[in-house]
Amino acid sequence: MESPDVSVIIPVYNAVDYVGQAVGSVQAQSISAERVEIVIVDDGSTDGSGEVVRELAAADSRIRVISQVNSGTPGGARNPAIGAASGKFVFFLDADDRLSDLALERMVDTAIAEGSEVVLGKIASVDGRRVPTSMFRESVLDADIVRNKIFNTLGPTKLVSKTLIDRLDLRFPTDQKVGEDQPFMAAAYLNASKISILADMDYYLIQHRSDRGNITFTKQDSFAHAEVAVRLSRVIERYTEPGEVRDALIRRPFDWSLPRAMDSRWNSLTRGQQEKLADYIRTSVGHLYTEGARALLRPESRVRTDLMMSGDLDALAHYIQFIGSSEAKKIEWRADAFRTVMPSGLSGAGPIESLEASAPKISCRLESVAVKAMNVSVAASVAVPTFVGAPDMLSLRARHRVSGEIVDARVTYEERKVGTENFLVAGDFELLGRGVWDVYVCVIIGTFEKLVRLGSSRLATIPPEGVSNQSETSVPESRVFAYFTQGAGNLAVDVGSVLHKNVARAAVIGLTVDENACPVAIVNLTRPPRVGDEYFAYLDNVPSYGARMLLPAERLGSRVVGLRLPLTAEMQGVTLTASAVLGGEPVELTLGGSEFWSARLAGFGLADSDGGLKVTEPPLDSVVRADFQQAVAPSIARIKSSMTASRKSVKSLVGAVPVIGPLARRMSKRIRSGS
């Protein structure tokens, strides 16, 4: 009988709620059934998992079950299956995970077509469990072990050539509960004739177990983590030559497992245990801690390893305690680099270069954005919470999305006070050239320069659709839109209507009153009203109304709407401004026409005020509300009935309500003409 293409190995220990799903995902594969065998090892389960897999085997001749006394480790369950596997390739599937339907067919066919001895399929989580991602940015049929960051995933859930396993006589250590897969996969990677990465879909799906029984969550002491680092380092040393590749790979044990051996667990050891473990690490892998490898470590890992290698265990214990505190988050700029601010009592931390730290995290919030004529004004706050000091300079920068041209704003305000965590910068972009510009905050500290995209975090009062100069110009080439990108929501500026080509315009052409004596603004559009069009009001000195209110709008004609404005006689001194969002684009809406407002009928006055309307005192001869309603009731009835009427009805309305005035008559002419 011809050997199957792939043997799927599933070690099982007390996974009764999950193993059926894992096996079912193999049975549901798109690959031909005869190309797959399933080897399950029941590693002494006590929860009924053994009975489940034996029932599955009775119904599927491709399943072989090996039962054994509990080995205590994943390696002890996988190794017997490796010896029993007859497939050309082996795939290790954990009992609480599963495969997507096309996974085996695509991986096996790729391995055969490409001559690959190891194939990595993209790993995904079904419930938010952390997964490796750096090596799955794209599919790579002939991957480089360093450049494609393959060593960042040393789990066994890969397709591996059985010939490669037999050639190297690879088996998993049977005395490790965690990390036993690392020397196995490292040896496979380093000896494979070709490695392929498939990132075109999710291949392997992991999940949290409800009982927190995932083996990777098993707590290990400092000795266990050190042993993982030592065993992986020995494999790397065995299969590589000294140099850049080895240094790059040795970073994994020195920057991953060793720091776990030298965290709070280290300080729980006795001094004798610390000395014993430090001596074991130094004698086992100290010669691999070269300057090249050291330079690649994270700053905290480097300091810990330096202190341990030097034998200064008092300083190491002090440093471990220090980095677990909030003090360790503080950094400064010293000797042309960011350095950890060390406590004065910590000695033996090594030379100043040992204290080099990663650049601080910088976050920005957009505080305001405005467009006036062709100029864009921007203000932003900048937070650098871990930095001791203040940036040397803050600025605002725009980058042309096509040409890459850089334009710095003229800074109009800057606040950088030492001792604070938040700083402010404001500036004007004057006469940007035509095109789309992305906006950044530029932070300079010493020779360090960082551009931070601006806009995704912004003040709640900033309109989400952005702002523009539409009310100031009707010429497309002169239009400026400051808007927020889809998805990330970053600030961008469109100069000359490059993206905003067919934005509608709106103009207030008159004022009237409704049955409650509230103002109604009559708005003429450059195109018919659409579902999704919105109109907003902004009231100053009226906190209870909030920053922005959605205005009710009713259609009066083919290109005319009426907006009910929330102004009353009790709001004397309040100014209302408005804006519109038409088709998802920001449109400024200048209010006016107060010269035709009937203060006598409404009981309060309105005055034009910087693009808005201000409530003023009522005229001396104003009538009481009852008189008002009686006087205008017939006209009000006609207003209400005309909201859905034809242009002819709108014409009759305008002629029947003399308080609207000449502006409304001009409006009726536009309605009749269809403009």
Image (cartoon, helix red, strand yellow):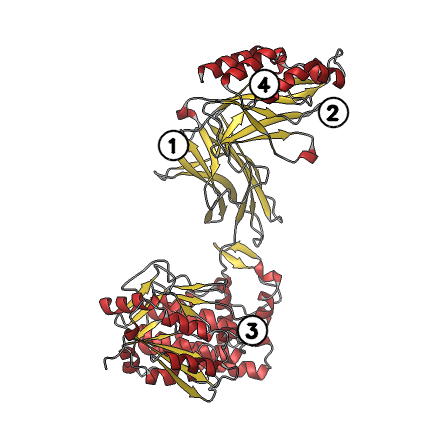
**Camera-nearest label, 4 or 3:** 3
Q: Do the residues labelled 4 and 1 touch (CB within 8 Å)?
A: no
> Mark 4 highlights which residue?
592
Front-most of residues 215 and 413: 215
Note whether residue 241 is visible.
no
The local secondary structure at tag 2 comes to helix
The residue under label 2 is which amino acid type?
Answer: Glu
The local secondary structure at tag 1 comes to loop
The numbered disc on residue 219 is none
Of callouts 2 and 4, the N-terminal one: 2
The local secondary structure at tag 3 comes to loop
Q: Do the residues labelled 2 and 3 touch (CB within 8 Å)?
A: no
Please state the horizontal and vertical placement of residue 19, each as a whole percent of the image: 45, 75
Of callouts 2 and 1, the N-terminal one: 1
Q: Looking at the rendering, which quadrant does residue 606 occupy?
A: top right
> Mark 2 highlights which residue?
570
Q: Is 19 positioned to the left or the right of 609 in the image?
A: left
The residue under label 4 is which amino acid type?
Answer: Gly
Q: Label 2 to label 4, Cα distance in Å? A: 20 Å
The residue under label 1 is which amino acid type?
Answer: Val
Q: Do the residues labelled 4 and 3 touch (CB within 8 Å)?
A: no
> Mark 1 highlights which residue?
498
Q: Do the residues labelled 2 and 4 touch (CB within 8 Å)?
A: no
Q: Label 2 to label 1, Cα distance in Å? A: 45 Å
The residue under label 3 is which amino acid type?
Answer: Asp
